[in-house]
Amino acid sequence: MPEGGEEQLLMVYKVKYGTSAIGYSASRSDRKTLAIEVHLDLSIKVIAPLKATLSAVAEKILKRAQWIRKQQHYFEQFLPCTPSANRCRANIKLHFICA
């Protein structure tokens, strides 16, 4: 068991949401509530209480799925673009103009 609230091993899971799936990495920690983090690279990390079941974690992910997708959609604008995409070239030019 981890000491001082230290997190346990990271595992990767998927939960079906509509016609797609939400993939997330999960770890356990000595905490009371479940944390869901959406990162700039669009990855999702869940930190669950030690006593939380996998089905309870999946249920929480589904409950917050709309929020997760909204965050991912927002963060997409910050992803690096490929130079071949016209849309990205315009964004890059706009970025430099605004800088």
Image (cartoon, grey):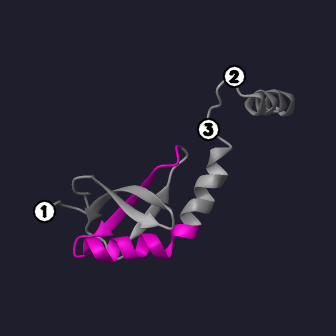
Tell me if residue 58 is in the magenta stretch: yes
Q: Does the CB distance between marks 2 and 3 fall below 8 Å?
A: no
Where does the image place residue 97, in percent across and percent down from the top left?
86, 29
Query: Can you tell which mark lies on residue 1?
Result: 1
Residue sitting nearer the eye, 13 or 2 = 13
Is 14 situated above or below 89?
below
Q: Amino acid at mark 2?
A: Ser
Tell me where the magenta segment starts and ends, as one range: 41-66
Disc nearest the viewer among 2 and 3: 2
Disc 2: which residue: 84
Element at label 1: loop
Where does the image place residue 68, in percent across and percent down from the top left?
54, 63
Left or right position of 65 against 59 = right
The CA span between labels 2 and 1 is 49 Å
Disc nearest the viewer among 3 and 1: 3
Question: Which residue is found at the position 26% from the left and 63% from the top?
Answer: 28
The residue lying furthest to the right in this view is: 97
